Structures are given as structure tokens and as C-alpha cells.
Amino acid sequence: MPRKTRLTILIPCFNEQGTISLVLESMQKLRKQIDFELVVIDDGSTDRTLEIVQTSNLDIKEIIALGKNRGKGRAIIEGLKRASTEYVLVQDADLEYNYKDIVELWRVAIENSADVVMSTRLSGARVSRVHYFWHKVGNRVITLMFNLFNNTTFTDIYSGYILFRLELLDIGRLIFNRWGQQAEILTFLTRSSKQIYESPIAYFGRTYKEGKKIHFTATLSVAIAIVYTRFRVQFLKK
């Protein structure tokens, strides 16, 4: 595996004091396999999340503390502005995704000179925790909708890991700060990329009691982002 730093991992977090230490520990383990820079963005947490990050012994390139909660999308935008490597990946601050899968995504990217490597929880995953039925229905609906609008064959557009070349995304064009942002980013990447791959990952979805934040109603905001961004991309080309 190449040792030259070519990857930045962003960790946006909001009130994740129960899991952030474990996530940071997983990043330390990941460093034994691939080289990367780490940027943590605290989205106005009101618990001890920021304190835990600041006192961590992990080598963190930059810790960004937003003054108030502005949404995961805004936290990601701020992190993207600090990234300086060829590739970027977002790691959520919960424990729904296994850091070991990043190694495989990175291998796919390097071996295939990929522009984008999209993860999927719904096709070929080695293990997945059983999660909410209506979330899966909503995911299927928005994935089908995205594929129809963008002529793609993704199986899970809201899987948490997207590894992509930073130069292919114009950060200044991003306008969604919450759930719609992933569809927005993937739309822009789809239009600007030539080599797009999909790779299965494990998924350990949390319950709402365990801190899950997304609700089935988010499907509507995602659908709006898909339609709006697709036509916006077409307009920007003119």
C-alpha cells in the first residue's frame, strides 16, 4: 500500500461523546495500514465531544470547532476546505461503519485510478445489523430516483463512505447543509468523473436510543436535493 499521504479523512461530529473516543482509536489502527491526514470538525456539540477530541493523543492535522450546530453538511464543507490531498473520505463519528472497510475502498481507488469509490451496504456486504424497514424503503426510493436522474447504477447512495478525488468537486457550489448534501455531492461527482466504482461494506446501524439521528422524513429533503442539483448541474453547463 502506498505510504505517500494522498488521503484526507474528515470526521464531522455532533454530541458523540459516547463514541468519538472509539472512532479516534479506530483511526489510529487504520494508520498501520494506510497513510492519511485527519481533520475533525465539531459541529457545535453541547456535550464533551470537542474536549475528548482536543485531549486525544492521536495525530490530528486540524480540529475545527464551529460555534453552533449548523448541520453535518456544513461541517463537511468546512472540512473539505482544509483538505489538501488527492482523495477525501468522510468518517462518521458514530460506530455504524467499520474502519477496516476503508482499506478495501482505498485499494479499489488506487488499483483502478478511480475518481470515485462509493460504498454500499445493500449489495454484497459481509455483515449488516438488521435496521429499520422504512429506512430501507426510503433508501431504495431515493437511490432509484438518483439513478434515473443521473443514468447510474448505484445500489445505496446514502451509504456512509464515499472516497473521491477532491479536485472533481467544486466546494463553492455546495448549498445543502443537512441530509440533502450527500445526494448533491454525488450528483456533482457523477457528472465530473470518468472512473466510478462501488464496493460493499459492513453496516452496524444504531437505534434511536443509541443516538441515531436520521428519520424516514429525511427522504423528502434528499429527493428535493436530487432533483434540484441535477437541473442545477445542467444549467451550470450552459
Image: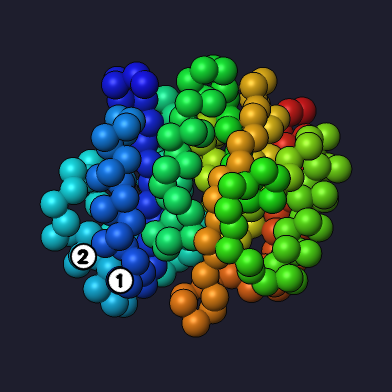
Instruction: Say what secondary structure mark 1 lies in.
Output: loop
Residue lying at the far right of the rendered structure: 148
> Residue 130 at x, y = what percent?
63, 66
Residue depicted at x 33% and y 56%: 23
For residue 175, the mark is none
Report how many numbered discs are placed on residues in the image: 2
SS label for mark 2: helix
- Camera-side residue of 60 and 135: 135
Q: Measured along the vertical axis of the image, is residue 71 above or below residue 46?
A: above
Q: Residue at x 78, y 56 (%)?
A: 140
Is there CB contact under 8 Å for labels 1 and 2? yes
Q: Position of residue 89 (x, y in %)?
A: 45, 40
Kind of residue at badge 1:
Gln
**Would you name the residue on which mark 2 appears?**
52
Please determine whether, in this image, residue 4 is positioned above or below residue 7: above
Q: Which residue is mark 1?
A: 17
User: Please, which residue is most extreme toward the bottom here?
Assistant: 209
Give residue 103's position: percent from left, percent from top: 43, 34
Mark 1–mark 2 Cα distance, whole angstroms, equals 7 Å
Relative to 174, 149 lies left or right: right
Quadrant in which the C terminus is drawn: top right
Residue 50 in percent (x, y) is at: 25, 65
- Based on the displayed image, in which of its 4 quarters is residue 176 positioned? bottom right
Is residue 26 or residue 92 the one in the foreground?
26
